[in-house]
Image (cartoon, helix red, strand yellow):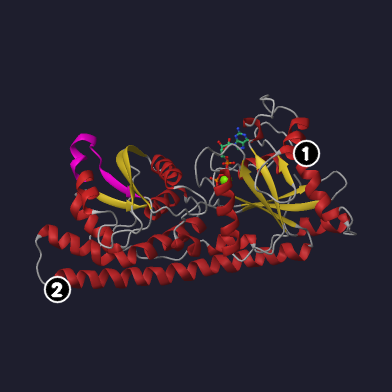
């Protein structure tokens, strides 16, 4: 690995605020403009923000939703609301205030000054969670890039803030010099990270072209975070991938081969989940990871059938797929966690026949075929495997023998 000098400790600017070491008490703030993002109401979005705070290791001690058509340019919320929140500080003991939408650098600064505690927006929180999940070099590089891109326009604010707190005066004093230095250092770091990520992209592209050469179809799992993509991958491919009840559990793409006894194969790829209001810096920084979806022959859209916001989650995923330029890739919808659903007569879903009943009677906003599964109860898994094999081998003349040899050459062991 390349040697990289660390940024000098004294000068190292803050990355997105870390919430990890001790439990922090968060007060949540949202704006209800009457408009919805991807079908999420302001209340649903706030509930999700609360889950994000918990995931980051924080505790929600209060929340408020202000009705107004547009954010206030200086403070995002109205001054009256701001005073109300300041007044609650003693009673609630919050140590940070988290906003559900992106704050401009100057709004964040103004709010920190008015509230006297740190202020985060949803983007900073998500970046923080990603940073805590980034265990591989590839994920770490991409998260760091996204964090620096997020931080760069906020540097001035942070320094002005500190200068004012320390009583520093003057526009060209040491503070300004320091700021210039920090900007330059971060700019250099961004350039270096982009170069390293470019290398990762090239490696991945090479792997993908080797896979393409095998002629083996590729199925990629996509879906809202926590829908059960990795659990489904385990169930279908017997793969040892991490599945946990947490958002953004998976950051790195994993590909495994799946086959039938007659020797027909496809490759199955699991990757990072989507969420509404993902920071733009994150999506662009995760290009190397998300490019794994580019060569998929089929996207398997995994939906959490028990989610209260199921339709909004599906809309978010479809929008993200579109934004990634993948609208032309065929997609099959899988409604997972069927064990948590009930039939029309109120009986729980426990058998394969129950899944078929669900598939014929569902009222989900999906045109076309829907497959129901329970990854954890192992329901509908064989049927899904068969359905996927049929997709590629049903009528094709692809020679399974060739496929097996080619797969072995591409480094995929049988499972
Ligand atoms: N009841 C039930 N729980 C499930 C099912 N499938 C997955 N889960 C649970 O849902 C949680 C999330 O599962 P994952 O497989 O990690 O979800 P994911 O979509 O990979 O999530 P990210 O990687 O965070 O985007 C875990 O606690 C799983 O045990 C299912 O069929 N039924
Ligand atoms: Mg996962």
* Picture coordinates of residue 367, whole percent (x, y): 71, 51
- Residue 42 shows up from this direction: yes
Q: Which residue is mark 1?
A: 382
**Label 2 to label 1, Cα distance in Å?**
68 Å
Tell me the quarter of the image containing the C terminus.
top right
In front of the other: 36 or 218: 36
In front of the other: 61 or 162: 61
Tell me if 136 is positioned left or right of 3 in this view: right
Q: Which mark is residue 171?
A: 2
As displayed, is residue 136 above or below residue 326? above
- Residue 381 shows up from this direction: no
- Residues packed near mark 2 inside 10 Å, few (<14), some (14 to 19) or many (20 plus): few
* Picture coordinates of residue 351, whole percent (x, y): 75, 28
Tell me if 391 is positioned left or right of 128 in this view: right
As displayed, is residue 334 above or below residue 38? above
Q: Is residue 397 magenta?
A: no
Disc 1 residue lies near ligand 1 with CB under 8 A: no
Q: Residue at x 68, y 45 (%)?
A: 334
Residue stretch in magenta: 86-99
Q: Is residue 87 magenta?
A: yes
SS at mark 1 in the image: helix
In which image quadrant can residue 381 be found? Answer: top right
* Picture coordinates of residue 14, whole percent (x, y): 29, 57
Tell me if 120 is positioned left or right of 310 in this view: left
SS at mark 2 in the image: loop
């Amino acid at each position: 690995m390349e040697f990289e000098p660390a940024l000098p400790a004294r000068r190292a600017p803050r990355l997105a605020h870390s919430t990890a070491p001790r439990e922090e008490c968060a007060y949540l703030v949202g704006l209800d403009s009457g408009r919805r993002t991807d079908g999420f109401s302001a209340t649903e979005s706030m509930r999700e923000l609360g889950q994000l705070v918990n995931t980051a290791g924080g505790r929600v001690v209060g929340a408020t939703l202000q009705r107004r058509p547009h954010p206030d340019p200086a403070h995002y919320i109205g001054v009256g609301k701001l005073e109300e929140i300041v007044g609650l500080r003693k009673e609630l003991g919050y140590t940070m205030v988290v906003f559900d939408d992106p704050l401009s650098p100057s709004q964040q600064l103004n709010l920190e000054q008015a509230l006297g505690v740190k202020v985060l927006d949803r983007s900073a929180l998500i970046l923080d969670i990603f940073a805590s999940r980034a265990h591989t070099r590839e994920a770490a590089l991409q998260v760091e890039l996204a964090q620096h891109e997020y931080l760069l326009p906020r540097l001035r604010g942070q320094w002005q803030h500190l200068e004012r707190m320390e009583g520093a005066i003057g526009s060209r004093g040491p503070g300004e010099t320091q700021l210039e230095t920090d900007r330059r250092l971060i700019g250099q770091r961004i350039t270096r990270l982009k170069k390293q990520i470019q290398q990762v992209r090239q490696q991945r592209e090479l792997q993908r072209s080797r896979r393409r050469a095998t002629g083996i179809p590729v199925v990629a799992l996509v879906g809202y975070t926590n829908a059960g993509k990795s659990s489904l991958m385990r169930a279908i491919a017997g793969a040892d991938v991490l599945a946990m009840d947490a958002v953004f559990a998976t950051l790195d793409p994993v590909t495994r081969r799946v086959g039938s006894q007659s020797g027909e194969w496809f490759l199955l790829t699991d990757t990072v989940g989507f969420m509404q209001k993902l920071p733009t810096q994150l999506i662009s920084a995760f290009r190397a990871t998300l490019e794994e979806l580019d060569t998929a022959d089929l996207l398997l859209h995994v939906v959490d059938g028990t989610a209260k916001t199921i339709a909004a989650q599906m809309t978010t995923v479809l929008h993200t797929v579109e934004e990634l330029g993948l609208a032309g890739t065929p997609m099959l919808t899988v409604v997972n966690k069927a064990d948590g659903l009930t039939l029309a007569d109120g009986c729980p879903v426990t058998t394969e026949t129950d899944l078929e009943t669900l598939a014929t009677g569902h009222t989900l906003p999906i045109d076309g075929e829907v497959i129901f599964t329970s990854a954890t109860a192992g329901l509908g898994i064989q049927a899904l495997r068969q359905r996927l094999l049929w997709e590629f081998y049903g009528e094709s003349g692809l020679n399974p023998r060739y496929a097996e040899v080619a797969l072995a050459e591409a480094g995929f062991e049988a499972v």
